[in-house]
Amino acid sequence: MTKLFGAILALGVSLPVLVYQFIIKHEEIPIVDIRNYTFSEEQIVEGEKLAAVGACIVCHTSENGEEYAGGLALPTPFGTIYSTNITPDPSTGIGTWSIDAFRRSMKEGLDREGNHLYPAFPYDHFVKTKDADIDAIYAYLTTLTPISNQIPKNELQFPFNMRELLAFWKILFLDDTPIADNPELNGEENRGLYLANSLGHCGACHSPRNYFGAVVQNKPYFGGVAEGWDVPALGKQSVAPVKWTFEQYENYMFDGWDENHGIAAGPMTAIVDHLYDASEDDVYAIVAWLASLDSSDSNETVSTSITERYGKRDWSENEQLGDLNPEGHRLFGEKCAKCHKQRIASSQPVSLGLTYSLNAPTAKNLINVIKYGINPPYAVSRRKMEAIELTDAELELIVEYVRARFTDLPKWENIEADILTIKRSH
């Protein structure tokens, strides 16, 4: 399907895009010596904190690689893209990029030489960022140790390896309209609105994408997919059994854990860890904005109606599921019940019935957690979960059992296919 779509796309848009490129040629910005710039200590510190909000280090650091030196493999439906080196190395990094070149890359998706950048670098969000904030990040990057790191070539199928096609993508999807304050929000919430939708690029993962790989603009924060994980919807679209509150977002964003929602896992773990380096006021602003997304008057908590709805049933009580899925019941008793007996559990590591992994639209998150464990955020390092060794058949049985035992939701479809997909991605 992807290949067919690519062929149609190439035939339909290549000619007009190439004409567009010929008429509007993006110029190369002259090289500079980045060391010639001087910035105030205040601007550099601000840039470091804003880079943490943008989680720049997460994508621009490869596994076991030097910080900000790039080379991280970013899987996309169109192939693999490798992140760039943004240390001030003159040969392989941005050591010859002027501040104008850096600003253009953030807002227009163009490198110093005028080549289109792939939107795996989320300039469709960064375009909303104020110039002063971009300049502060640039100031911070100039202080990094230059690291020589030649980045591998992207591994993209034709026609997606033709950067010229990105001109067409930008015409359709790159919106440079500034983020306006929402009059219904207070100052802190509007600050969070700005940060989350520009540098924070939260919607890049928490929103669905279309066939062109662009965020679906009329479904903001309806949930998405990232690195083989389902990413939860936010606000009124959230499937969380317990409504998120300011205090719960505060726990989650600062520590990566809240007892009513569980632990940050997968791609979110690194985001939470690096928010430690952000301004506390900025993190609180994002928390305030997130809490504003659901204006419901409901304040349901575990101690009230959620307990009545889910109960505190032990996994072995009234166990009709033991008859329906005896092998899943047995495996759960051997592998999981020691830590996860109850839907709502004050004395267990987590209340399974409240976790997104069990309430998600697919079994992907639960499969990831069982098969590969959880390496928790720094702030809650003791909440580590070891991987559980199971055959694929056993894993499918236990996934089916846990979903049925700890939620009232329908059985997941395509569990076997999800297991194979996740195995291939590791």
Image: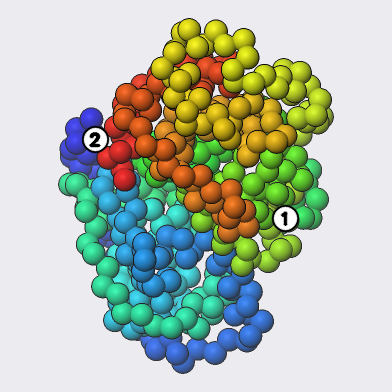
Q: Closer to the camera, 133 or 319? A: 319
- Number of residues whose C-alpha sits closer than 10 Å to that of mark 2, classed few (under 14), some (14–19) or many (20 or more): few
Give the vertical position of 321 relative to 48 (above or below). above
Query: Residue 310 appears at what percent x and percent y?
Result: 69, 19
Q: How is the image coloured?
A: rainbow
Residue 15, labelled with which disc?
A: none
Mark 1 vs mark 2, CA separation in Å: 40 Å
Residue in the image at 31% along x and 43% along y: 425
Give the vertical position of 276 relative to 236 (above or below). below
Give the vertical position of 335 relative to 65 (above or below). above
Residue in the image at 23% along x and 30% along y: 1
Q: Which residue is mark 1?
A: 285
Query: Residue 406 appears at what percent x and percent y?
Result: 58, 22
Q: Closer to the camera, 33 or 377? A: 377
Q: Which residue is mark 2?
A: 2
Mark 2 and mark 1 in contact (Cβ < 8 Å)?
Answer: no
